Image (cartoon, rainbow, N blue to C red):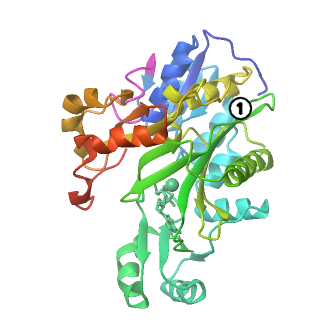
Amino acid sequence: MKQDWIKPGKTIGILGGGQLGRMMALSAREMGYRVAVLEPGPDSPCGQVADVQVEAAYNDLAGAEKLAELCDILTYEFENIDANTATWLEQQMYLPQGSDLLSITQDRIQEKRAIASFGVPVVPYQPVETYVHLQEAAEDLGLPAVLKTTRGGYDGKGQRVIRAAAELEAAWEEMQDKGPFVLESWISFEKEISVIVTRSVHGELSVFPVAENIHKNNILHKTIVPARITKETEKEAEKLAEHLAMSFNLIGTLAVEMFLGQDGKLYVNELAPRPHNSGHYTINACATSQFEQHIRAVCGWPLGSTELLKPVVMVNILGEHMEKVMEHVRDIKGAHLHLYGKAEARTGRKMGHVNVLAETTEEALKEVNDSPIWSSEESMRRITTGGN
Ligand SMILES: Nc1ncnc2c1ncn2[C@@H]1O[C@H](COP(=O)(O)OP(=O)(O)O)[C@@H](O)[C@H]1O
Ligand SMILES: [Mg+2]
């Protein structure tokens, strides 16, 4: 189904009702669209701001059919949409992003193979399906390494770091039901960075400023922009993201997570075919947000400027930070608060984020570091609950 200009007033359907869908929906509404969302849980972050929520599982074709009746165009906010549903919807409806990139990024091995096939470096890895594979892969790659489920992982879930051969058996015991896996060399990286690239249905390409990311407990904690990297690395990261976008024939948004190795080289860690947590800074710090850009791209608008208006630090608000937010956020100079409307503040659950704008990233970082909101991080208990 080919259509390249979806006029304001039409209805955009979003698969998935989380915070990314919510922020997409808010941008869509600002641009004059109506929004419908498919999400099994009631009162979802996206459902709260959409015109309609179809409450159905992602693999429930009756639900998908209902969504299809309501919408003129379809997009998705997360990549773990059931592939059958996505294929079915692609046939029934206008899904300009297609479902190919979706299915590739659903599987870490397919994703790594595709990236490598375009000449882009990935961290050394081996597929693992049995304990013997694990032993062999550990032997070949060396330790430490990280065992990751090929499907369904996010925020460090479905991952187990293996530091020494003596841990192999325990790691397998713990993980074996969740396979297949990939074993990856553990990189002692210099920095983690990411680039968000957008390509419209007309083939116009845009790249947002490179972001420097700091994770805690495998969950994104802070994004710093401009990233504190050399001009050459910045150019290389942008080039790489553009190259991947072109190679995949991207339509919509692609987030490219990279490690900057101690050798100064960039390795792609993973891809997300949608707006990304490390792009939330764009909402307040760029001329166009990643969400507006995404809507522009799929609905056939010219893309907006990705110019950085001011240095920024984005900090995530997790469940354990919520109590202090109300009291202390007002003391952070230059802070813009975004909350996702989630009722239950579980430990490790993403509840919102703050964008802190300042004249320099040092100033913004000082504001964040001086705030008591995130100060008890070190004493944080191991995350046992969580989820989107
Ligand atoms: N091979 C690796 N070497 C070093 N750190 C890693 C490696 N793989 C993952 N990590 C750390 O864990 C975080 C989450 O892993 P990632 O593969 O991005 O999974 P997800 O974001 O889907 O949970 C990364 O951002 C990085 O901080
Ligand atoms: Mg990641």
Work out whether 355 lies above or below 173: above
Q: Which of the 4 image quadrants contains residue 299?
A: top right
Under tag 1, what secondary structure?
loop
Left/right of residue 111 with respect to residue 212 in the rendered view = right
Q: Which of the 4 image quadrants contains residue 202?
A: top right
Work out whether 70 lies above or below 270: above
Q: Is residue 121 magenta?
A: no
Give me the residue at 68% from left, 27% from top.
298
Which segment did they paint magenta?
A: 38-52
Q: Quadrant of the C terminus?
A: top left
* Residue 359 visible in image: yes
Q: Residues within 10 Å of mark 1 (few under 14, many from 20)?
A: many
Left/right of residue 185 with respect to residue 53 in the rendered view = right
Left/right of residue 54 with respect to residue 379 in the rendered view = right
Q: Nearer the viewer, residue 29 or 206?
A: 206
**Total count of labels:** 1
* Residue 58 visible in image: no
Q: Quadrant of the N terminus?
A: top right
Work out whether 228 lies above or below 42: below
Q: Which of the 4 image quadrants contains residue 174?
A: bottom left
Q: Amino acid at mark 1?
A: Pro
Give me the residue at 74% from left, 30% from top.
200
Q: Nearer the viewer, residue 331 or 136?
A: 331
On the image, the x and y values in percent for residue 48 come to 37, 22
Give me the residue at 67% from left, 32% from top.
95
Q: Nearer the viewer, residue 43 or 182?
A: 182
Give me the residue at 55% from left, 77% from top.
128
Secondary structure mostly seen in the magenta stretch: loop
Q: Is residue 44 magenta?
A: yes
Q: Cβ(mark 1) to ligand 2 < 8 Å?
A: no
The residue beneath circle 1 is 96
